[in-house]
Structures are given as structure tokens and as C-alpha cells.
Amino acid sequence: MRIWLKNTDGSSIGRVDARDDVFGAPPNSALVHQVVIGHLANRRQGTAQTKTRAEVSGGGRKPRPQKGTGQARAGSTRSPVWVGGGTTFGPRTRSYRQRTPKRMRRLAIVTVLSEKVRNGDLVIVENLELGENKTKHLAEVLRNLEVEAPALIVLDEMNSSVIKAARNIERIRTLPISLLNTLDLVNCGKIIMTVDAVRKAEEIWGGARSKSRRTSSSVAA
């Protein structure tokens, strides 16, 4: 497929050839949903911990006689109904981790990228070389490209000048293509990619769908 290529001044300078298996994949919302849920689950620390009545200190003796006081029967001051008592069904330290196969993660990224292309939310630029590490220069480029926050700038590698210029713009993130993930793609409105980033994306994720098809066909046989 062919996608419009733009300059930093916002003018179109032609079209760039892109692989259909990376930027033209069919929709698959169920796959994207599963990968995003797994990503969010893996971010949870799972370190919340409460004490049960067996773990709270104190409460060794019966607080009052069983009968004769007119008050409710109580065997310990560390019961969950008492102030300072243990917690019933409180959070415990656990792992929320979900295993998401690498092929699913790759296909989810390809699916979201393709959806961005269909919606016109992927902007490919020739390069993002800034004269100075100034936020106003990058803000001018974003205005020329008609890109508003939230947006994601994807580079082929770490570029300190673009990172420094973008960090003062609210809800504008920069990522190298090697760290791109489904959650960041879903949370952003538009994506700005350089031509080098497009080529690297094709190198990383190209052919992922055909590999899965070959695997499934061999298993069926």
C-alpha cells in the first residue's frame, strides 16, 4: 500500500510504499482488547497487604465476661467488628501477571497501526530533524502537520533533540520503534512516524501474520 509522505512544513511530497501485512492488516478488536488487558495487568504491583485477625497484635484475653454485663458476647478485641481489629477479605500480596505470547503482541501492534492508517491518524514524515532543542520548533511542526494531543511520535532510534523538545508539550510522547506497544498506540490520537521508523517497523513485524498462518496450517495437517 502507499501512504502520503509529508515534510515538517505540512506539505505532501509524495507517497511511501508500506507493507500490507504491517499497515494493512484487517481489524481484530478482540485480540487488541486481550493484549491491552494483559499489558495493564502486568503493570500492577500486587503488593497491597492487609492483616487478618490472626495477624493483628493484641486481643489475647477475653475483653469482658461472657454473661452479666448486658453487652454482646466477645472473645477478642481483634475481631473484624472491633476498631483496631483484623480485616475481612482484604487485599493480599499476589501476582496479577498474564502471559501474552509474543506473536499476539506483534499482531495487536500491526492491527492498531493498520486501523490508524484507515482512519487517517498515521502521519509519515521524511525526518524530524530540529534546528535546536526548542519546544516551540516542535510545536510549530505539530501545527503544520495538524496533529493535536494526545499524540505519539515514533522514531527509528532515540533522538535527544526531539525528546527534549517534546517533553514540555502536554500529552505528546516520544518512543523509539523498538519500544512501541499496543497500549501506547491505543491511548494516542495520531501517530507521527519517520520513514526510517516505518522501515524498521516492517523489519520487526513484517510477516508475523503469515508465520502464524503457516504454524496453524501445519498443526491442522
Image: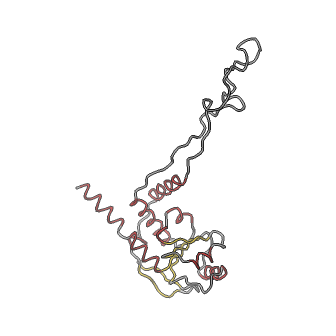
Q: Quadrant of the N terminus?
A: bottom left
Residue positioned 59% across, 40% down in the render: 91
User: Which residue appears farthest toward the top when viewing the image?
Assistant: 68
Residue at the left extreme, as displayed: 221
Residue furthest right as drawn: 69
Could you tell me residue 143's position as x and y percent?
A: 63, 80
Q: Quadrant of residue 147?
A: bottom right
Coloration mode: secondary structure
Q: Position of residue 199 (x, y in %)?
A: 42, 77
The percent position of residue 106, horizontal first and vertical second, equals 42, 64
Q: How many marks?
A: 0
Please tell me which residue lies in front, 125 or 119.
125
Is residue 78 found left or right of 100 in the rendered image? Answer: right
Lateral position of residue 151 relative to residue 217, left or right: right
**In the rendered image of this protein, does residue 175 appear above or below residue 102?**
below
Q: Position of residue 67 (x, y in %)?
A: 72, 12
Above or below — where is 112 with respect to 18? above
Quadrant holding the C terminus = bottom left
Instruction: State the residue at coordinates (31%, 62%).
Output: 213
